[in-house]
Amino acid sequence: MNFIKKIFSGKADESVHKQFVRFGKGEYRKRALLSIWKTKSIKVKSSFEFANDFVNFVSELGDASFKGNIWSKGELTGLSGKKKEGKIVYEADKLTGKQIREIAPKVYYFLLNADGPGIKLRIKAKLPKPGKGENKIDDKFCQLELDEKYYSKVKDDFFWDFPDLKKGNIEHTFIIKEIILPKGETDYAKIRELAKRKGKIVRIANIDGKEVKKEVEFEA
């Protein structure tokens, strides 16, 4: 389940919290961009925010092999990495879906490509620069092409709240109204990492030419 669906389902967890650590109070438009185009195959594209969700989603589909960079704060068994920006960057080659699911709780960013029968995932190898405005968000940071047999799974995870569709574009506005600091913590780095964001998510979609707008309060 991707982080936006978790929020709308009232199931925000640690993976959702990680998405908002870099945000202060304010309104952030055109975030978590997502699109789908269904013809003889299914093409799904997104901005950076969905990178981990795309990788986790593909890991559940079948016999796909993953390759690329993994950012983690802790050590990952069987992989070699280098320290960078307070985390460890690992180069991975031929990881299985099972291995992805095993290490996922320790991972900050999956910047991986994947290939398998009817599966092609491409994610850019470098993290986007922080502070980019709404008009500079890369809506093709993640690109997933799948056999049409996977349509129901794609729809259930990423477009769960809409009827069957052939073409759709979705963007989200993050409205952070309050930052809830952890009680009793004095270490600034830990405060920044543990502080929760409270506010609202606005989901704005164009589904087969029909505009739809939904919103939900959240804390993560």
Image: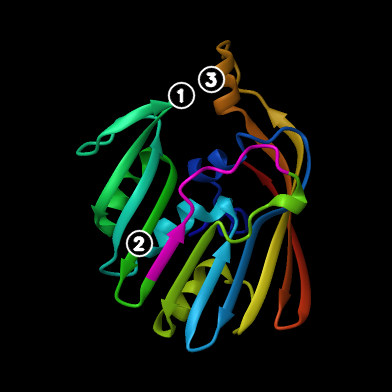
The residue to which callout 1 is attached is 86
- Mark nearest the camera among 1 and 3 is 1
- What distance separates the C-alpha of mark 2 from that of mark 1? 27 Å
Task: Say if 178 sits above or below 187 in the image.
Answer: below
Query: 73 left or right of 211?
Result: left
The residue to which callout 2 is attached is 114
Q: Nearer the viewer, residue 127 or 157?
A: 127
Whether residue 29 is visible, yes or no, is no
Label 3, secondary structure: give it. Answer: helix
Q: How many other residues sit within 10 Å of disc 1, few (<14), some (14-19) or many (≥20)?
A: few
Instruction: Specify the quadrant of the image occupied by residue 22.
Output: top right
Image quadrant for the C terminus? Answer: top right
Q: Amino acid at mark 1?
A: Gly
Between disc 2 and disc 3, whose residue precedes? 2
Between disc 2 and disc 1, whose residue precedes? 1
At 61% from the left edge and 84% from the top edge, which residue is drawn? Answer: 166
Q: Position of residue 12 (x, y in %)?
A: 56, 48
Whether residue 91 is visible, yes or no, is yes
The residue to which callout 3 is attached is 190
Q: Nearer the viewer, residue 127 or 168?
A: 127
Is residue 5 covered in magenta?
A: no
Q: Tags 2 and 3 in contact by the CB under 8 Å rule? A: no
Q: Identify the magenta region.
A: 120-132
